Amino acid sequence: MRHSIFYIFLLSLCMVALGSCARSEKDKPTQEIATSADQIPGHKVACIRGSLQDLMLTQFEGVEVVRLGTAAELLLALEQGTADYVMMDSLFIIGSRNEERNIFCCFTMELCSGNAGFGFRKTDVELCNRMNYFMDSIRQRGICDEMRRRWVCEGADKALMPYIKRYDTGKPIRVATMPDVPFSFVQNREWVGYEMEMMYRFGEYMHRPIQVVDMQFGAMVPALNSGKVDIIASFMYITPERQKSVLFSDPYFYCTNACFYHDNGRPVNKGSFIERLKRSLYANLVEEQRWMLLVDGLCATLFITILSILFGSILGAGLCWLRMRKGKFAQQTARVYVELMLGIPVLVILMIMFYVVFGSSAIEPVWVAVIAFSLVFAAFSSETFRTGISSVDRGQTEAGLAMGFTKNQTFVRFVMPQALKKIIPVFKAQAVSLLKETSVVGYIAIGDLTEASDVIRSRTFDAFFPLILVSIIYFILAWLMAKGLEHIIKDKKKA
Amino acid sequence: MITVNHLSKVFAPDLVVLKDVNCEIAKGEVISIIGPSGTGKSTFLRCLNRLEQPTSGEIIIDGENILNPKVDLARLRMKMGMVFQNFNLFNHLSIIENVMVGPVRLLGMSREQAYAQAMDLLDMVGLVNKANAMPDELSGGQKQRVAIARCLSMKPEIILFDEPTSALDPTMVSEVLSVIRQLARQGMTMAIVTHEMKFARDVSTRIFFMNEGIIYEEGTPVEIFDHPKKPATQAFINRIRTLEFEVTDRHYDLHAMNGQIENFCRKYALAEQTVHTLQLLIEELLTNVLPYTGKIHIDINFTEKECGLDICCIQENCRFSILDNPQADELSIQIIKGYCDKVEETADDNNKIIRMHIRKR
């Protein structure tokens, strides 16, 4: 036991060291900085997947487009040289303390600029009209300018969300967004930013609660149209293309596009290893109580994992029973189910559950995840149970029956205890792998452990520390879970 | 106590294991069920406590037909112990637990009482010092003795033994048999499927000889072992082993046949010389002597008790004498006569039969 803890500690240390090594500067020749869009062909240019910039870059010949998910990733791509330039709205520079990171704007592109609007379902004209009316009224009262000053001009980091009355009752308005300073981001476990303030003010105006759903940019339009969210507030440019499937409000923000580069020639004072570690610790955990995000994520991960193992095992036992029965039809049904579940990636099953099966119901995403993982785990565990039970010699059953035990008594008293010995090691491995597989639930807007690290990354623009921290947490969880299961079994053996 | 009428068991349309079994077992009897492999001895035994579901017929135990679907099987099985070929001890329970689990869970005995009884039974089978061992730590003979003790712990009215010594090393057979002998002396009703002929003769009150899915012949040990009436019983008791061939034309597979003869002889430990003699004899017969007027059947019988080989060759559709045929290969016939101790030719309808006998040298 003591040894294991020591090893975990050692491993953690190794990973942190690895992380800081990977961050050390690479030697790269200083490059000619592009001053206009004509000069970017032949270079690698990064942008957000599915964004307007993505569309624009695709039309450039000779540009190698690197499509990424979040603003934080864009920044890292620049720093590590995965991309030579980043194409983003010109406000990109505000939130990320880019000066400290030697990231500068090389040119702006008026031509490809645009208006961002809130997205609504095509059928939801009513809500959209209310939004437009509401925006008109606050613009006239000067609130819009105030918001702009607060979040965009004075720097999002120091900004504080003003008091806005929130409603708990009534049908919530679900808002899709993703972290993007200064429009929407997490501060002290609250969603804040220009768009978020606008949304909360709209909630106040509508007398309805606002429910923020964090999801990938590319997933927002499908989520909107399948009824998972009601509004997209994620700095979405109004384009004719998007207007085909989304009803846009009046524009709320005009922004130019800009191209950014990383100046690796300038020396940076990074401080010693310990200092950097301290700074990372502070920025990623302490500041704005970010560690609470990890705790919330951990709870979600554990909730989904434990319930899925529980329900999945029960369902798996049922499936196993069906498969071992004499009835051909039940057997075949169970077999087909198991093979289907084993043959489809978990993530795909999860998305189908979220967008198709429960597409129009108001069920919480966490429960969708529990259902999806239970269904998958049932298939795995039923196979484990079945092989475990078949591995027990038929003679054991016969001996029990011949003595005068009923079929059920024989199974419980003699077959199951022997089958369990075979089942437990495999079951343990499956449970641990389920824990790890739950890391994909971020795709359906659940703030689990992995997603929490993404949110932190989007604020601190530090890739390594949150990722390594989360990997250590996962490792310890998996280890504890395996130990815990072993412990339960040992107790059983003694009893 | 047990009456069986017209019992049959069909596994598949072409696999009829029990055709029509009728018998009666009285209290206190020790019945040994013997017979060649694959004639349904074990299946019959397993039908008696319905581990195997009979296809038709009736089994009446104490006036109750147990094939009635409403019958309380568990209660019925408590009265009938069974000892298996592969022991089937509960591997996750210690020896003493194996012997206690039935009385405690099914007979409602207190643990103390069951423990005392289990120790007595283990003492009887000579394994008290293994009480706390696990089944894996025991030898086959010891396991089977524990299985018998476990069976007795339920105080059964009859014990069914399904080849109790077949899975044992020869050195361990006697320890198990002596326990069964002891039970027989105490007047326990038993039905034993066995291949141990001497044991069956010593311990039984009656013998069932099963063949081709029926009880082919039954009687006291003396009747069955010393004066068997029917040919199949005689063949089995005298331990006659048979190898059969059928040949339709001259293009038979000589090498395959020689291989089979060699295997057959090796199985019964016949001398190398005998193998060559037999192979030569069959080859001469098939190449130079037989006229191929129709199908040819060759039976090679080896009688263990007399240590002799009988070869019976039937040539179908042959109207003339084979051995006295002037066109036959004189030399080949001389060779055959030289090797055999006795050669004779008989006729049966259209067929000619040549019988040859070789004494084992």
Image (cartoon, grey):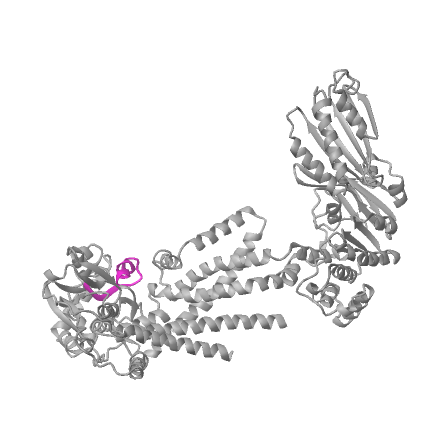
Which residue ends up furthest to the front in the rendered image?
A: B331
* Foreground residue among A406 and A454: A454
* Foreground residue among A16 and B103: A16
Q: Quadrant of the C terminus of chain B?
A: top right
The answer to which image quadrant residue A188 occupies is bottom left
| Residue A7 in view in this figure | yes
Q: Position of residue B281 (x, y in %)?
A: 75, 30
Q: Position of residue A338 (x, y in %)?
A: 48, 53
Q: Does A343 sit left or right of A401 as displayed?
A: left
Q: Does A399 sit left or right of A130 as displayed?
A: right
Q: Position of residue B81 (x, y in %)?
A: 77, 56
Please provide the residue range marked out in magenta: A217-236
Q: Does B257 sit left or right of A352 as displayed?
A: right
Taking the magenta stretch, the answer to whether it contains residue A184 is no
Residue displayed at 80% across by 26% down: B337
The answer to which image quadrant residue B318 occupies is top right
